[in-house]
Amino acid sequence: MVDIHCHILPGIDDGSKSWEMTAEMCRVAAQDGITHIVATPHCNDEFDYDRDRYTEMLAELSDAAEGRVGFSLGCDFHFSYDNIQDALTNPRRYTIGDSQYLLVEFSDYALPPTVRQDLLSLASCGMVPVITHPERNQVLLRQQDLVLGMVEQGCLVQVTANAVTGFWGRQSKKMAEWLLQRDTVHVIASDAHDPVRRQPVLSGARDAVAKLVGKEIADALVTLNPAAIVDGQSLPYQPTFR
Ligand SMILES: [Fe+2]
């Protein structure tokens, strides 16, 4: 399996706190059957994003995983005015590896009134926004149809693995299931922050999704589609969005 959203680089955001913790996260992921992880540090008001420095850290990350997991660099890109402007100028500064795919995290308090236009602007600069964890966003939880509109305009949807298995509560689980049943989910990722509480594991979600919508889709969401995203390819499994 391939995990495209993981706060595994130590000491740079609210994810892993040390190389020891990072090594433990690698062990947990490998044990779960994850072969590739995209390290996605936050880029928001609280945490700066230093692409060059994080790229240099990838070699040490490989050592921490003892070669059992491969890595790329991405970014947990907060959808703020400043971030958007910078991404429009430097489209490959925030995307996953050398690909066109950009993780996008919305504020829990409000979406900008220009959200649809802003997403189109990112797309017009060659980026494909991947909306992260809509099932945990307080605005989107109240207005679920907004997610469908974003998919209609070409965005992808990433649901959190442990939202499917209930960690984020009943409302988030219900919305994750609603999106899955409408065939509006492109990828499942861990959004892991540590080796214990918010772990880099996908197998539990894969099994729950298989029960809900079938094994073929479940495997696509944790393996085929995220692998294609890492490689900058179009998605082998295209949700029909009904
Ligand atoms: Fe995240």
Image (tube, rainbow, N blue to C red):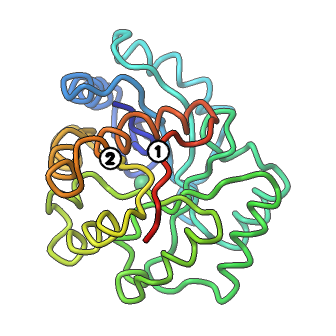
Q: Point out which mark residue 3 bears.
A: none
Label tally: 2
Q: Are marks 2 and 1 in contact (CB under 8 Å)?
A: yes
For residue 172, which quarter of the picture? bottom left
Q: Nearer the viewer, residue 88 or 147?
A: 147
Q: Examine the rendered structure and indicate whether residue 150 appears above or below residue 127.
A: below
Disc 1 residue: CB within 8 Å of ligand 1 = no
Residue 73: horizontal and vertical position, in percent?
A: 56, 34
Residue 75: horizontal and vertical position, in percent?
A: 56, 47
Q: Examine the rendered structure and indicate whether residue 141 appears above or below residue 18.
A: below
Q: Residue at x 27, y 51 (%)?
A: 161
Q: Residues within 10 Å of mark 1 (few under 14, many from 20)?
A: some
- Taking the image as shown, residue 136 lies to the left or right of residue 230, namely left
* Quarter occupied by the N terminus: top left
Could you tell me which secondary element the residue under label 1 belongs to?
loop
Sequence-first disc among 2 and 1? 2
Q: Amino acid type of disc 1? A: Tyr
Q: Amino acid type of disc 2? A: Ile
Residue 182: horizontal and vertical position, in percent?
A: 36, 69
Locate ligand 1 by image quadrant. bottom left
- Name the residue carrying label 1: 237
- Name the residue carrying label 2: 217
